[in-house]
Structure formats: structure tokens, C-alpha cells
């Protein structure tokens, strides 16, 4: 199953919609609840990152019998220091966004914890692509 | 315990019609959404002072039984509309988070 989403950087309403849709699809396919939860967490964090830091982007999700692959791409300013960004608690989120409960510096660490494969391609000024794979056992 | 029973027992106000039959099996209190995403479990009543639209997505992803807004904080109309659409119960309480946790613990045990 292939799913494609646009992450609209101007539409706060829709932030989290792609994650909800992926979660529902996995649950409908009978994937075990712990795996669905891991996919939902990883996808949500990546989607919110693309929304908050990347100004929006797109997501492509492929669900196969043994794995789910989620690729989220944004066209924002990229991550200057990826190893710093992977550290829990480190965030560049604005004060306004933090007041809304985002920007805890847990996004990328949460993704790392909940995925079996993680590949991040980023460069300053060139946006960020986060490729996540979760095995369905 | 169903959400509607919790509302009655603790003198809360239901802000949605949706989700009143959901079963509450636990409680989770936190306002940092990333932490909620990983910590809130299915069936939890989630207590948060955040009332913007995105909390509905988080509650849905976590299969939370309901969202409890403490301290009589108002929830905006667009959040409640989205909650109805998604089937998420949102309820309001005049109590603070500590007292809510304590009373819910008594009710659930």
C-alpha cells in the first residue's frame, strides 16, 4: 500500500493528519498495536518537525507485509548540526511554538527510539529528508 | 469507567458529545506533546492545559479515552469541532491537575 501526503506548512489544522491516516491504515491491516504505536510516534514527530522547522513538505509511506517505510521531506533551512539535533532536549523551536507544547527537543530522539532504520539527509539551505523503516514482525 | 460516568462523578463539563462511551482505564498528565506521544497509553484520560487543535491529533494517535482540560480553562471552538469530527471526548474541570489525578485514582481503584 502506498500513501502520499502534502504537509501544508501554513495549515496548523492539518498537522498530524498524515500520521493519523498512516496509523488507521496500519491498524486496519491488522498490524500489532505496539508496532502501530511506534509508527504513529515516529511519523508524528517527523510530520511536526517538517511543519514547525521545514515550513511544510511531503510524506510518502509504503506499507508492505514485513515493513513500513515512511519518508518525510521538507524544503526548509535544513539541520546545521545533526548530532546536536539527535540529542534529547536540544531544540531550535521558537518560544511561541514551545508554549504550545512543542520544541521539547524530543522529536528526533523519539524517532530514533521507535524505528528500526533511520536515515536523515540534510544540509543547511537544502531541507531535510527523514527516511524511517519499522519492521512488522 | 466510561467517560460520561467520570464526568458525572467528578462534576465535570462535557465540551463534546463525541467519545462519552469511551472506557477510561488510566490517567496521564503532561503538556509536552512529544512526551505525551510516547507516554500516554490507550484508554488514558489525558490531562493537559494545551487546548490548540493539535492536541486532538495527539489524543487520536495515542487512543486516549478523553482529554481533560483542568482549572476551568476554555477550549477554542475549532479544537472542539475537530474533536467531534474525530470522535475524541473533551471535558473540562474546575479542579487542578493534582486534585484531578488524586480523585481519578480513587475512582479507578
Image (tube, helix red, strand yellow):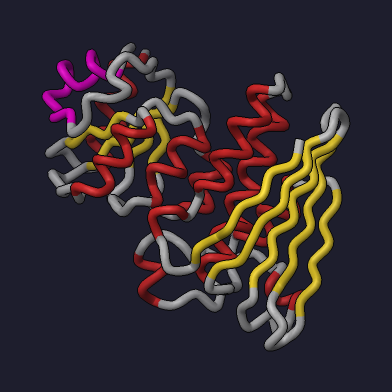
Q: Where A10 falls versus B2 (above or below)?
A: below
Q: Quadrant of residue A77?
A: bottom right
Residue at the spot x=15%, y=28% of the render?
B12
Residue span colored magenta: B3-14
Q: B104 or B83: which is nearer to us?
A: B83
The quadrant of the image that shows the N terminus of chain A is: top right
Residue A127 included in the magenta stretch of the image: no
Give the x, y percent position of residue A132.
78, 52
Q: Nearer the viewer, residue B103 or B63?
A: B63
Outermost residue, bottom side: A125
Task: Please tell me in which quadrant of the rendered image residue B52 appears.
Answer: bottom left
Labels in figure, total: 0
Give the quadrant of the C terminus of chain A: top right
Q: For residue A46, which quarter of the picture?
A: bottom right
Left or right for B74, reference A5: left
Q: Is residue B9 magenta?
A: yes
- On the picture, is B14 further left or further right than B101? left
Q: Position of residue A58 (x, y in %)?
A: 64, 61
- For image coordinates 69% across by 59% down, the residue present is A72
Q: Residue at x 82, y 31 (%)?
A: A136
Q: Position of residue B31 (x, y in %)?
A: 39, 52
Classify residue A100 as left or right of residue A65.
left
User: Where does the image place residue B100, in percent across and percent down from the top left?
Assistant: 25, 33
Asked if A90 appears above or below B104 in the picture, the reply is below
Amino acid at each position: 500500500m502506498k500513501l502520499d501526503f502534502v504537509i501544508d506548512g501554513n495549515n496548523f489544522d492539518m498537522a498530524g493528519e498524515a500520521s493519523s491516516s498512516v496509523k488507521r491504515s496500519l491498524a486496519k491491516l491488522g498490524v500489532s498495536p505496539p508496532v502501530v504505536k511506534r509508527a504513529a510516534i515516529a511519523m508524528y514527530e517527523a510530520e511536526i518537525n517538517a511543519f514547525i522547522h521545514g515550513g511544510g513538505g511531503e510524506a510518502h509511506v509504503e506499507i508492505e507485509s514485513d515493513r513500513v517505510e515512511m519518508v518525510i521531506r521538507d524544503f526548509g533551512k535544513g539541520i546545521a548540526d545533526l548530532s546536536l539535533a539527535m540529542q534529547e532536549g536540544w531544540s531550535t523551536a521558537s518560544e511561541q511554538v514551545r508554549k504550545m507544547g512543542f520544541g521539547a527537543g524530543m522529536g528526533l530522539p523519539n524517532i530514533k527510539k521507535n524505528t528500526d532504520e533511520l536515515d536523515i539527509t540534510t544540509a543547511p539551505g537544502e531541507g531535510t529528508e527523514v527516511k524511517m523503516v519499522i519492521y512488522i514482525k | 469507567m466510561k467517560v460520561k460516568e467520570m464526568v458525572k462523578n467528578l462534576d465535570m463539563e462535557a465540551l463534546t458529545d463525541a467519545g462519552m462511551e469511551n472506557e477510561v482505564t488510566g490517567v496521564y498528565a503532561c503538556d509536552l506533546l512529544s512526551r505525551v506521544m510516547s507516554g500516554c497509553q490507550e484508554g488514558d484520560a489525558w490531562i493537559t492545559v494545551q487546548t490548540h487543535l493539535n492536541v486532538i491529533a495527539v489524543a487520536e494517535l495515542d487512543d486516549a479515552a478523553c482529554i481533560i482540560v483542568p482549572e476551568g480553562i476554555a477550549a477554542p471552538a475549532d479544537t472542539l469541532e475537530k474533536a467531534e469530527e474525530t470522535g475524541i471526548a473533551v471535558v473540562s474541570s474546575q479542579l487542578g491537575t493534582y486534585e484531578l489525578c488524586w480523585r481519578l485514582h480513587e475512582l479507578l481503584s
